[in-house]
């Protein structure tokens, strides 16, 4: 073990760099970073196993930071490891800097996740732990023997998502998950005691965790706790480290600035900053320095890692020679490429609900994609993810040979854990629930989009046709919300989310194929509860790959173009039969994905939806859902839901709310008279 004096000096070096980053940027959170420096230093310099030459080595330990506002601590620690330069740190929170205010996914710089709102980071870590267990069950311990470390704060413990993570990780016995709780009792505006009076240790123990309480600023206690956590065989470990917010900080008058709420979310300030840096052994005029003994400390660790990683890589190479098929599978799984699926084997039942059609697709995927994990928030028999489950079995403590993750009633936790599975690498994750419950998932959906994690969202019961369950369970505004995100571009210039709402069973197959082939962004499939009539005979479903296409009435100059997605396409088609009797030339367009349609050549877009043509849209959601396709103005009309739904059988609701052939006829006739 390294000399305690050197270890404390290294932690002070992290404190100096963290406080200086915030001071230079005139923005940020120094206090927590200073308090957590000891744990980060011990973890990075003595315990975390990684390849300094290859940040993407699949056998590496993963570190997930939950409180993203503590990014100065992470960047400073990674700087000591050689992943950032001192110049990088001086550009903290500036345009184009690799050190943004909250960490963003950047594996090449040692950052495994975008932290996002409190609570999500450690949920992603739990998902990564599940992925490691899943892969170990298939590939063996030689190549999957790493640990997943998470760092959480008081705020994350307060966030509701911590309940889901605690319950699930304990229930599954994720002994490869080691979490440090930076318990400094300080929040942004109050001390924690103002809002929280609970026994956190007993809470996690009740979930089945191994809990260790330590002084989080004591090197030897941190070492002992991490050693015990690594040796734990049956449970995830929570290390509760009582730390000092703003450790080492002094006020302008020289008195202690420790345990002060003000250090949480603001620079220390000129006088306090100067005194603090001097107190910690740095030079306020030249604070961006790595001390010589600290350089030597991390240089020794790099040499140690060369030996550790060298031995593991040699074992991996020997394993690959002995298991060439598994080795090829592992390489393919971690490549991030779309899996090979024989979609021709899928035969759909006519007029079935698209959730049922999705179930058929999932059954095929369970058989053909061995690294796919499917999950449900206690709704697998309703969201029809049981089509996948029927071909495998659910994870249980000590058994990850199956491929189904029963998350329980915990949509946000499920979503973040599935994201974490894919951040780990080697797996494809899909998850299902009712569309109205996607509201619970929104923060995680946004993080998946931001990080470009290609998880698959399966949302069923897509409209007011949930019927008797009533307005509380009837999604009206949800499609508009996710379609708005579909219009948002990520940093790579791609759609943040690819959204599909198929019009019938066979179109569902095409949409699932597109979802599995999308390896750049998350994909959402919005599916019906009720059966939907098959599109007209002879429909070319392959055209659905363009996002919107003509499914009926391909007249060169139609009097009106009728546009919809999902269930409403067949409603339009039934209305068209009445309109044609009046000599009205109609074209029906199914638009399962506006985002995909808008990246088609302009000539194709104009051919399907001519700019100057009259267009009528029908949606079971807010009218604005179709505005991007139908437009706004005298040549456009959208019939949609202007209010929440009602409780009644869905066929009654269709009649009462105007989703019938007769009302389509009436609405279009009135529209054309104007």
Image (tube, rainbow, N blue to C red):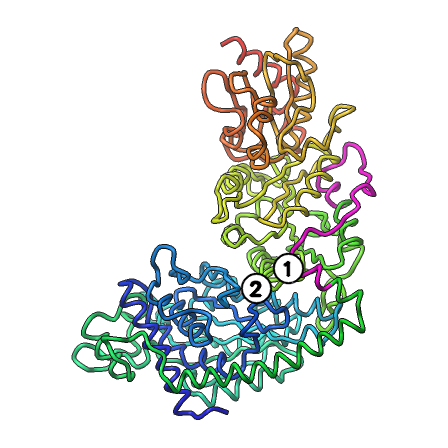
Q: Is 253 or 48 nearer to us in this picture?
A: 48
Residue 432 in percent (x, y) is at 65, 50
Residue 521 drawn at (x, y percent): 57, 48
User: Where does residue 628 sit, x and y in percent of width and height?
Assistant: 51, 30
| Residue located at (39% from left, 65% from top) | 69
The reply to whether dot 1 and dot 2 touch (C-beta < 8 Å) is: yes
Q: Residue at x 37, y 86 (%)?
A: 9
- Residue 533 vertical placement versus 358 (above, below): above
Q: Residues within 10 Å of mark 1 (few under 14, many from 20)?
A: some
Q: Which residue is mark 2?
A: 164
Considering every residue shown, the one lying at the far left of the view is: 253
Residue 62 % position (x, y):
56, 71
Please tell me whether residue 352 is drawn above or below residue 587 in the rendered image.
below
Picture disc at residue 408: 1
Identity of the residue drawn at 69% across and 20% down? 552
The quarter of the displayed image where residue 250 is located: bottom left
Is 271 left, or right, of 393 in this rendering?
left
**Nearer to the camera, 64 or 304:** 304
Can residue 355 be found in the magenta stretch?
Answer: yes
Q: Which residues are magenta?
A: 330-359
Nearest the eye: 472 or 605: 605
Left or right side of 50 for 580: right
Q: State the SS at label 2.
A: helix
């Amino acid at each position: 073990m390294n000399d305690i004096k050197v270890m404390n000096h290294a932690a002070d070096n992290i404190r100096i760099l963290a406080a200086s980053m915030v001071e230079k940027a005139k923005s940020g959170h120094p206090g927590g970073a200073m308090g957590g420096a000891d744990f980060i230093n011990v973890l990075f310099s003595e315990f975390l196993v990684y390849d300094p030459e290859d940040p993407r080595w699949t056998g590496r330990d993963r570190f997930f930071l939950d409180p993203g506002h503590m990014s100065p601590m992470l960047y400073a620690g990674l700087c000591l490891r050689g992943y950032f330069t001192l110049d990088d740190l001086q550009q903290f929170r500036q345009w184009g800097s690799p050190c943004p205010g909250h960490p963003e996914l950047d594996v090449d710089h040692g950052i495994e996740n975008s932290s996002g709102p409190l609570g999500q980071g450690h949920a992603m870590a739990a998902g990564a732990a599940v992925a490691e267990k899943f892969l170990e069950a298939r590939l063996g311990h030689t190549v999957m023997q790493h640990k997943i470390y998470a760092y959480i704060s008081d705020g994350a413990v307060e966030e509701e998502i911590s309940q889901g993570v605690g319950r699930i990780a304990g229930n599954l016995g994720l002994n490869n998950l080691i979490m440090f709780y930076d318990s400094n009792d300080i929040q942004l505006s109050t001390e924690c005691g103002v809002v929280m009076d609970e026994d956190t240790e007993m809470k996690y123990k009740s979930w089945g965790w191994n809990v260790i309480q330590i002084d989080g600023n004591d090197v030897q206690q941190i070492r002992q706790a991490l050693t015990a956590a690594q040796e734990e065989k049956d449970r995830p470990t929570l290390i509760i480290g009582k730390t000092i917010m703003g450790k080492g900080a002094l006020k302008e008058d020289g008195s202690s600035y420790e345990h002060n709420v003000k250090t949480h979310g603001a620079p220390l300030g000129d006088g306090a900053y100067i005194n603090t840096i001097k107190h910690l052994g740095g030079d306020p005029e030249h604070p961006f320095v790595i001390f010589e003994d600290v350089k030597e400390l991390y240089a020794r660790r790099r040499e140690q890692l060369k030996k550790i990683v060298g031995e593991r890589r040699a074992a991996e190479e020997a394993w690959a020679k002995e298991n060439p098929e598994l080795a090829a599978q592992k390489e393919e799984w971690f490549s991030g490429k779309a899996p090979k699926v024989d979609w021709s084997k899928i035969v759909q039942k006519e007029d079935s609900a698209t959730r049922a059609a999705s179930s058929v697709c999932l059954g095929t995927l369970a058989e053909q994609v061995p690294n796919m994990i499917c999950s449900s928030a206690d709704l697998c028999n309703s969201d029809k993810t049981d089509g996948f489950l029927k071909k495998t079995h659910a994870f249980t403590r000590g058994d990850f040979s199956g491929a189904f993750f029963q998350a329980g009633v915990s949509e946000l936790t499920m979503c973040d854990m599935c994201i974490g599975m894919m951040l780990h690498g080697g797996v494809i994750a899909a998850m299902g629930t009712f569309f109205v419950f996607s509201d619970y998932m929104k923060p995680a959906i946004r993080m998946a989009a931001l990080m470009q994690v290609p998880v698959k969202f399966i949302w069923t019961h897509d409209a007011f046709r949930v019927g008797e369950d009533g307005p509380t369970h009837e999604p009206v505004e949800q499609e508009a919300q996710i379609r708005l995100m579909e219009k948002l571009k990520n940093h790579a210039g791609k759609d943040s989310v690819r959204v599909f709402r198929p019009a019938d069973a066979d179109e569902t197959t095409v949409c699932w194929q597109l979802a599995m082939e999308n390896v750049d962004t998350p994909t959402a499939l919005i599916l019906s509860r009720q059966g939907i009539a098959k599109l007209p005979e002879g429909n070319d479903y392959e055209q659905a790959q363009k996002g919107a296409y003509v499914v009926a009435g391909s007249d060169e100059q139609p009097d009106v173009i009728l546009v919809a997605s999902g269930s409403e396409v067949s409603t339009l088609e039934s209305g068209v039969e009445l309109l044609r009797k009046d000599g009205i030339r109609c074209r029906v367009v199914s638009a399962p994905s506006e985002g995909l349609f808008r990246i088609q050549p302009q000539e194709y877009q104009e051919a399907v939806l001519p700019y100057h043509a009259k267009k009528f849209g029908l949606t079971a959601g807010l009218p604005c859902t179709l505005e991007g396709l139908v437009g706004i103005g005298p040549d456009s009309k959208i019939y949609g839901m202007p209010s929440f739904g009602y409780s009644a059988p869905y066929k009654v609701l269709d009649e009462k709310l105007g989703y019938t052939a007769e009302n389509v006829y009436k609405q279009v006739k009135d529209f054309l008279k104007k």
